[in-house]
Structure formats: structure tokens, C-alpha cells
Image (tube, rainbow, N blue to C red):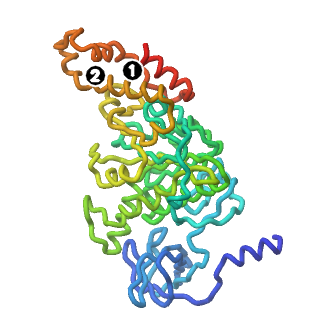
Amino acid sequence: MPFSSLKEKLANKNYSVSFGEVVKINATIITAKGLHVSISDMVKIVSDTTGQETVGMVTEIDADLFFITPFSFVEGFRSGDKVFLDSTGLNIPVGPALLGRVVDPFMRPVDGKGSLKEGKLTPIIKAPIAAMKRGMIDEVFSVGVKSIDGLLTCGKGQKLGIFAGSGVGKSTLMGMIVRGADAPIKVVALIGERGREVPEFIEKNLGGDLTNTVIVVATSDDSPLMRKYGAFAAMSVAEHFKDQGRDVLFIMDSVTRFAMAQREIGLALGEPPTSKGYPPSSLTLLPQLMERAGKEEGKGSITAFFTVLIEGDDMGDPIADQSRSILDGHIVLSREMTDFGIYPPVHILNSASRVMSDIITPEHLKAVMKFRRLYTLLKENETLIRIGAYTKGSDAELDEAIDKKEDMEKFITQDSTIQIPFSETVEVLIALMNS
């Protein structure tokens, strides 16, 4: 190994012999004493008997005692084990070697394709883009999905939520967006999902193609801290490429599992539970993650899609409600449309893009408004039409909606293996509304 490289490695490590001692352990928290630590410091716990090691984070301090949330489980550790301070902090190596790989939150490969080259160290936790340094969202970001590109157009640097109940089709839509998105770099964070879903998502939804894609995985069997910081680590990877002036697509599945991880951590530390058992820290954590996406002046952009699992299809869920207030738009997936065989089941009337009117042409906007109006008329009069109580000729606009119903449903339906160019989507939409 070259001397300069060895010197750099040594400079990033703390080989001090000072250490603390574990005094108490429960299922999720290790209590220790004997070190001067700060909140968010990284520590290593070493078992005196088995030599087993784990890394944890200082999450609470009480006089001479400090409380550690471990990144793994606590089995095998006991009182008296040594605790060492790790001066590297919560940093991860990032770089082009990550492209095409599946990694854990510490950027360790989990795809069996060998080790990664050492990359530039970057902190997992960073401040969001300063408000006055954010660039204006003035360019269309195409995702290749007609219902989104045509009726919920998003822009480069926009943050959107995909709100769906279980089994409605959000993973399929995520795959369509990753394959069809107009972005040179794609970062996918799979947080808190079943381990079985990771290879399924790669093979079924992405077709096994990870070109220019980084997948960061923290499954449901990982510790709460791994799930929490998996999301922040994935965002740091996206920021690395954004700082190089590149446009990045960031997709995270799911915000709900991320918030649940913080709920476990917060309740273990004694935070009071609020709505649905979520402590206050679960809600304050969401903007710290979501606001890091966006467009920065003089640099690139991160266009983000965050999936939110709606338990029992309840849009009043505290995580869904908080997410909607932070994001620049929301895409709601409808179970009713899934039952009718309409895929992707994007509920146009319940969804919105807050920047759409600023980035599309007046002709396109006019077509969108007419589509929504006709679709609303169909939904409002659906029962009358089905039982034959509506007489054609009573309302000219409703007559037009009925005539175009089949074509409108065809427009919002799309095979998951097909991506449609943005220009073609707009052309078809305008032609449909003007016919």
C-alpha cells in the first residue's frame, strides 16, 4: 500500500486507548459510562468474553451516563464490556464505484459482487439546502409514465410523495419511474421492507438492469438505527452526485417504515407517544430528510419520490399528513382503480403537482384542466350513467365526458414494461382534449 494512502487511513481513525464501560443493557439501548461523548457520536462496543463487536450511536446523555442505540442487535454483550469512541463519526465512502451496486447503509456491498473501491468520505447527516441557494424549478422532469407526465407533470428538483395502501401497486410504479426517468443517476433506498422484496424489485421491476443506479438496502430485520440512517445514507449518495452538477432521481420506499424506526428509538429513550404512538421526533425527522432533496444553484438537482404506506387507506395518518405538508406534490394510488384493472392506479383527482403550472406550456395546462374537469363530471354522475337515469343531451359537457370516457381511461392506463416519451404524452393529451 502506498505510504500516502496508509497515512490518510490512519488520519481517519482514533487509536486512543481510552475507553468506557457498559453498565446496563436492554433490548434496544446500551447504557455506558467513562467517556466524554456528545450526542450523535459513534462508538464501538467490544465484548471482553467473545471478542464480538458492534457499532452504535450516542442518543442520550444523563450526567456521567450515556445511552447508545446499536446498529445491530445486543445479544452476546454484557455489563463490563468496553466502549471506544470512533472519531470518524457517521461518515460513508461515496463515489462512482457505487453505480450498479446494492449496498447497506454503511456502503458495504450486499450483492455478492465483491468489495468496492475506497471512496470519498462524506457525512450521513447534513444540513438541507439553504433556502436562498435553492434554484427555481423551471424544467420538466420526465418519468415515462403518461398519467404523471401528462396530468401531474413534475420538475427537476421537485419532491413528490407516492401515497398508497398495501398491495395497490406502488412497487410497480416505482420500477416504471426508475426505468423511464430522464436522469443520468438513480438512487433507490429500500428502507424497512421485507428482504424477499429486494431481489424481486431488482429483477421484476427493474428487469435486472442497475445501470447508473445505486440501491441502498436496510430491511425490516435490521436494527431501527440501520433503517433510520439507511435513508440518510442514501440521500448522502444522491447529494454526492448532485454536487458534481448531475441530475439525480432519488426514490425511497418507504417513509412510513423510516418513521416507524424512529418511533422504536424514541419510545425506547422515553419520548412520549402522540398520535398512533409516534413520538415528536418521528415527525421532526421527516423534513430533515426530505428538505435535502431539491435543486441547488450552481450544482445539480435531486428529484425525489417518497412512498408513504397508508395503513387502512387512511389519508389522515400522521406520517401521510406531515409528508403532504413538506412535499411539493402527492400522487395517490387508488385501490378502487386497481380493482377495475386500471394500472398504474393513479387517482388523478386526489393527486396534485404544485409546480406543474410553472413548467408546462399554456396549451398543455389547458388540456390538463379540461381532462380533470371531464373526469370529475364522470365521477360525480357515475351512478346516474350506470343505471341509465341520465338522458344524453341534458348537459353538453357531460356528454363530451361520456364520449371521451374510454379514451381518457386508455390514456391513464399503461403497461408496466413500456415507457412513453414526454413529448408524445403531451401530444396525445392535447389531441384527445381538442378532438
Residue 417, how many percent across, how many down? 53, 29
Mark linked to residue 378: 2
Q: Label 1: how many residues lie within 10 Å, few (<14), some (14-19) or many (20+)?
A: some
Residue 240's x, y, as percent?
A: 63, 57
As measured in the structure, the alpha-carbon distance from the residue carrying label 1 to the one carrying label 2 is 11 Å
The residue depicted at 39 percent of the width and 33 percent of the height is 346
Q: Quadrant of the C terminus?
A: top left
The disc label shown at residue 408, or none: 1
Q: Say which residue appears at 46% left-offset and 26% top-offset.
A: 414
Quarter of the figure that contains the N terminus: bottom right
Q: Give the camera-side residue of 192 and 358.
A: 358
Which residue is rendered at x = 55% and y = 44% of the image? 156
Please name whichever residue, 287 or 387, is drawn nearer the observer in this view of the structure: 287
Marks 1/2 in contact by CB < 8 Å: the verdict is yes
- The extreme right residue here reads 2
Horizontal and vertical percent position of residue 179 = 57, 36
